[in-house]
Image (tube, rainbow, N blue to C red):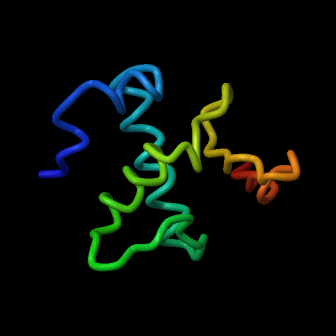
Amino acid sequence: MIEALKNDVIVRKVGGRFKLAVLMQKRMVDVAFGAPLLVNQAGKTLAESVVQEILEEKISLDLSGGVVEAETDSGEPAAAPADDE
């Protein structure tokens, strides 16, 4: 089991268990369809890498329920969010 999921730190960071599950699922689908991981995978499963992205605040859930990449140091979005519609 992923250790970070055993405590409530990640749950509070995202805003609840349901939102955490939605964010993880959406991000895993994005990666499966070719989006690059924002952390070094180095021997981790996809789920562990997604959890690491959340903990490092590299991704978050926007109000409409999509995945948003964190801003770069210049204050600009790292990449435009994909429009699923």
Displayed quadrant of residue 6? top left
The number of discs equals 0
Which residue is the extreme one toward the left?
A: 1
Q: Is residue 30 left or right of residue 74?
A: left
Q: Give how far across and how far down residue 85 sits, in percent.
A: 73, 49
Q: Give how far across and how far down residue 22 sits, in percent.
A: 44, 38
Rendered position, 58 above or below 22: below
Q: Is residue 46 left or right of residue 68?
A: left
Rendered residue at 79%/52% (across/down)? 73
Please name whichever residue, 60 or 34, is drawn nearer the observer in this view of the structure: 60
Rendered residue at 60%/70% (across/down)? 35
Rendered residue at 47%/41% (across/down)? 23
Q: Give how far across and how far down residue 3 sits, in percent.
A: 17, 46
Which residue is the extreme one toward the front?
A: 73
Rendered residue at 67%/50% (across/down)? 69
Please name whichever residue, 84 or 60, is drawn nearer the observer in this view of the structure: 60
Please name whichever residue, 64 or 2, is drawn nearer the observer in this view of the structure: 2
Q: Give how far across and how far down residue 2 sits, in percent.
A: 19, 51
Q: Is residue 64 left or right of residue 11?
A: right
Rendered position, 10 above or below 59: above
Rendered position, 45 above or below 8: below
